[in-house]
Image: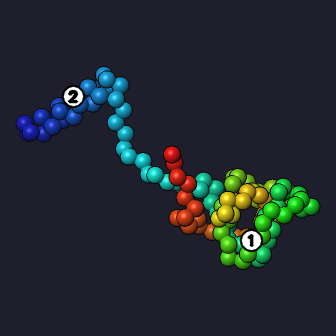
Amino acid sequence: MASTTRIVFSTITTTIAAAAFGIMIAPAQADSVRPAYGCFKVTAPTAIKVSALGTSTTLAAASKGDILMKRKRFCYTVGTMCAVTNHDGVEGYADRGNMKVHPCPASYSINKK
């Protein structure tokens, strides 16, 4: 019983001392975070375009099986275009009809620094 009381008192004393000196004791955080909005897997070849308009210029092509990272929470309702980034870092818009929701691979993790 005495050892338990001593441990509790020691913990309380350490916490009070840390608070008095303005020291924050926090658990360690991971070095990387998965993309916030998820990923898509391309089901049919599609173009990554500059804007959500169907007539905009094509930046890159995504082949069947490619993984695209979603950049925004919601896709546009007109034309069903979604803001995406490919593995090369090209940011643009792709047709939602040619993609399905897919878990993000570890290689798409974002480094926090």
Residue 51 x/y as whole percent: 84, 55
Furthest-right residue in view? 55
Residue at 35% of width from left, 25% of height from top? 22
Label 1 secondary element:
strand
51 lies left or right of 31: right
Amino acid bearing label 2: Thr
Viewer-side residue, 15 vs 67: 67
8 lies left or right of 97: left
- Which quarter shows the N terminus? top left
Residue at 42% of width from left, 47% of height from top? 29
Which of the labelled discs sits on residue 13, or is there none?
A: 2
Which quadrant of the view contains residue 42? bottom right
Q: CA distance from mark 1 to mark 2?
A: 59 Å
Residue 89 x/y as whole percent: 67, 59
Furthest-left residue in view? 2
Amino acid bearing label 1: Ala
Which of the labelled discs sits on residue 62, or is there none?
A: 1
Which quadrant of the view contains residue 8? top left
Residue 23 x/y as whole percent: 34, 29
